[in-house]
Image (cartoon, rainbow, N blue to C red):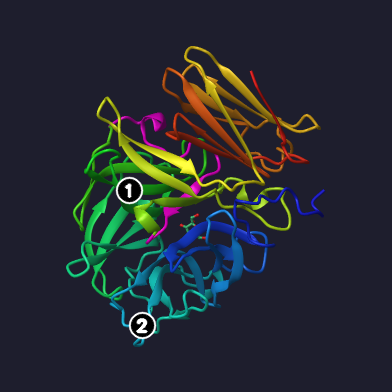
Amino acid sequence: ALGADTLRPTAHYTAEKTWLNDPNGLLHYRGVYHLFFQNNPNGRTWGDMSWGHATSTDLVTWEHQPTAISYTDDEFVFSGSAVVDVRNTAGFAQPGETALVAIYTSAATPDSGAQTQSQALAYSVDEGNTWVRYEGNPVLDIGSTEFRDPKVFWYGGEDDGHWVMVIVEATNHRVIVYTSNDLRAWTRASHFGPAHAVGGVWECPDLFPLRVEGTDETKWVLIVSLNPGGIAGGSGTQFFIGDFDGETFTAENLTDSAELEDYDWLDYGHDYYAAVSFNNAPDGRRLMIGWASNWLYARDTPVYPWRSAMSLVREVTLERRPDGAYAIAQRPILPESGIEVHRFTAPKGERAVATVSNSDGERVTITAGDGALVVDRSQAGENDFHPDYRPAAAAPLPEGDVDVTIVVDGPIIEVFADGGRVVMTEQVFPARALDRFEVS
Ligand code: FRU
């Protein structure tokens, strides 16, 4: 069954015929969105980790580009971020050039005999086409084997600002903040955590400001991926809302509860992980991409010849609710055609049951109402390729009318409920496209 190009999504990015995981180095530069990603250029499972590369001008059609930063005998190129070094603070650009700088985790390869994870730079002076490793690597090494996924951004004004890095000490459940003036020398400024979900390692942090809709107030959002121990089991992405002064993040939404349901999750499904945002997106938009899979079973999904997709690009916004709490809403960037988008409202006090199916009777059932959103993928096709591929995921919904948007693109279903405040991403493996829709 896997000889053919199985249900490849169109608006969700996939590598041509290889493995991918986390989005890396998300950056907008001169009208082009750059998506780098964890990629095995040689195979369909995790290994030989390198930064693959794709570009887009509309966020829904992606063009494959050559590998940006390749693994070596000693180094796997793990997750990280990229910046436009407009002021040439690192000195990589010659007069007339602008350097894009990637900050990635240099992970010792299994064959190297070492286990260190340190932070390294690579740069491009041709708008991201070719990348050169900085000869002074690593730029940040604390002798740790669990120190990774640097997200770097510029904080403050043109003249009085500085670079900020958030990075995890994965097994300590800590996000560490470092600062720098030149991307080469880094000073430890503060740490955040452990907090909320700590049932696995912390990975892939992000930190960014969002204006509270309809006000002049700005809040900061700290994203922390966690694996395992997520809300749906396995990989999950939580967030914290608070303030950041350039050195220290202070969360406002902390609870003492030990229940996963009491924390804040960017997505309640099984398949949304390692989500990070673009640097330098136009118009102050905050655009994010997650990896639409789960480490529980990612290596075994029955797709071919590619494996794993990115989520759709999502715009995130922040609002203050009548009860004073802050809420994040997500809205997918949709193509004009090529994928299925279904919308309905679950009226107050009732339960709406939506089915997305095909002529073989394979189906996904989405139930909204009674204070819950449930996505059941148990009848959606192949489901026995891994024992941890779980049948259903649930999320809390408010009382009252709830709007639901369901996006179906090949094997990926993204559900946005209650104005995008509740989101679920699920992978399914039907024999043919789920092109029928019913709601009752
Ligand atoms: C998250 C992650 C990162 C790491 C990368 C390796 O999915 O484990 O922490 O940098 O994948 O591919």
Q: Image quarter for residue 322?
A: top left
With respect to residue 274, does 42 lie above or below? below
Q: Name the residue under label 2.
A: 92
Kind of residue at disc 2: Phe
Q: Between 73 and 248, which is closer to the camera in this rendering?
A: 248
Kind of residue at disc 1: Leu
Q: Between 364 and 80, which is closer to the camera in this rendering?
A: 364
| Horizontal side, residue 339 vs residue 164: left or right | right
The label number, if any, that marks residue 10 in the structure image: none
Give coordinates of residue 208: x percent, y percent.
32, 52
Give coordinates of residue 44: x percent, y percent.
67, 60
Residue at point 26% right, 63% down?
Answer: 178
174 falls in the magenta region: no
On the rendered image, what quadrant is the C terminus found in?
top right
| Horizontal side, residue 62 vs residue 133: left or right | right
The answer to whether one can see residue 149 in this image is yes
Q: Name the residue under label 1.
A: 222
Q: Give the secondary structure at mark 2.
A: loop
